[in-house]
Image (cartoon, rainbow, N blue to C red):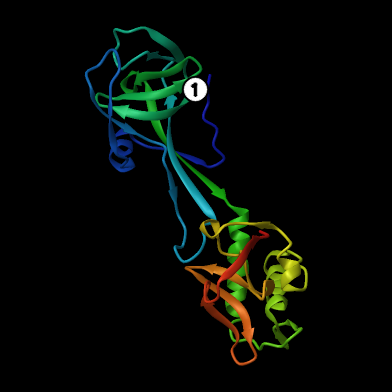
Amino acid sequence: MKRFLSPGRITAAVLGVFLAAAGPAAVPFTNDAIQAGPMTVYGAPKLEADPAREASVYTTVGYVCRIDAPEVNIYKSANENVPVIWTAKKGETFQVLGHLAGGWVLVDTDSGRGYLKTSEGASVLETVTEKIDKSAAARNQVVELALQLVGSRYVYGGNDPRTGVDCSGFTSYVMKHGAGVQLNRSSRGQASQGRAVSAAEIRPGDLVFYSSGGRINHVALYIGNGQVVHASTEKTGVKISNWNYREPTKIIRVL
């Protein structure tokens, strides 16, 4: 028997609320025992996060069907005149894959997908599962720390924002104090760490490198929205720039 296992919370929902509040799109559906008609499909993940930050918490909303009667038949199709593929027992739960008119729900069993009628003694329950992306959380912390340091002095060879930082001193500082990651001291050394990613893959917290004369000589921290924070010059200090204010040479991910 396939059982629905969720680390999140399961809350009971009245069937009418389940149908009205779920809100997914209806898609065409047919089988060998019922006339073609719309089936509402459930289980798509929802993303809940501050749009200004990289999402660190993902919420997936789904549904299960709990058997309340001593026994409920699960049929090959949404018709009580077709073969029964499974007889469910009281207390068992099944993942709900979709809903058809007349109180039929499509569920998943060890014998394959089948249909049961909730009116025969079953309840539909909503499930909410939250997953924390620890990498995204670390990225957010690094970006937040970097933004707090905008305006700090540029000092060649510096690695402490209180007295001044250069480009690699700045990235070393925010990675160490924002995410506990130790970086090499020079921009060229940092470019050899982690793994290279493409511009299409870039995410907040990635390191962006720039070259002069074929050699890497500058590094910045990508913060999203096409921008980087970096210790630029003695005149500007730590500032925000467009990520391609110079042509990027390499992008490295260490988080």
Residue 179 vertical placement versus 104 (above, below): below
Identify the residue shown where x is 55% and y is 72%.
247
Q: Is residue 235 above or below residue 19?
A: below
Q: Quadrant of the C terminus?
A: bottom right
Question: What element does badge 1 sit on?
Answer: loop
Image-based side of 158 in relation to 86, left or right: right
Q: Quadrant of residue 184?
A: bottom right
- Is 149 positioned to the left or the right of 243 in the image? right
Place residue 120 in its image quadrant.
Answer: top left
Q: For residue 7, which quarter of the picture?
A: top right
Between 118 and 62, the one lying in front of the other is 62
The number of callouts visible is 1
For this rendering, which residue is in front, 84 or 70?
A: 84
Find residue 227 and report its horizontal and vertical position in percent.
Answer: 51, 72
Q: Which residue is found at the position 30% from the left and 11% from the top? A: 80
Residue closer to the observer: 218 or 145: 218
Pointer 1: what residue?
92
Badge 1 local density, few (<14 within 10 Å), some, or many (20+)? some
Look at the picture and state if 52 lies above or below 197: below
Q: Reply above or below: 91 against 200.
A: above
Residue 164 percent across, percent down from the top left: 71, 87
x and y, in percent, of residue 37 in the image: 23, 25
Q: Label 1 sits on what residue type?
A: Glu
Seen as rendered, the residue at the extreme front is: 213
Whole-percent x, y for residue 38 in the image? 25, 29
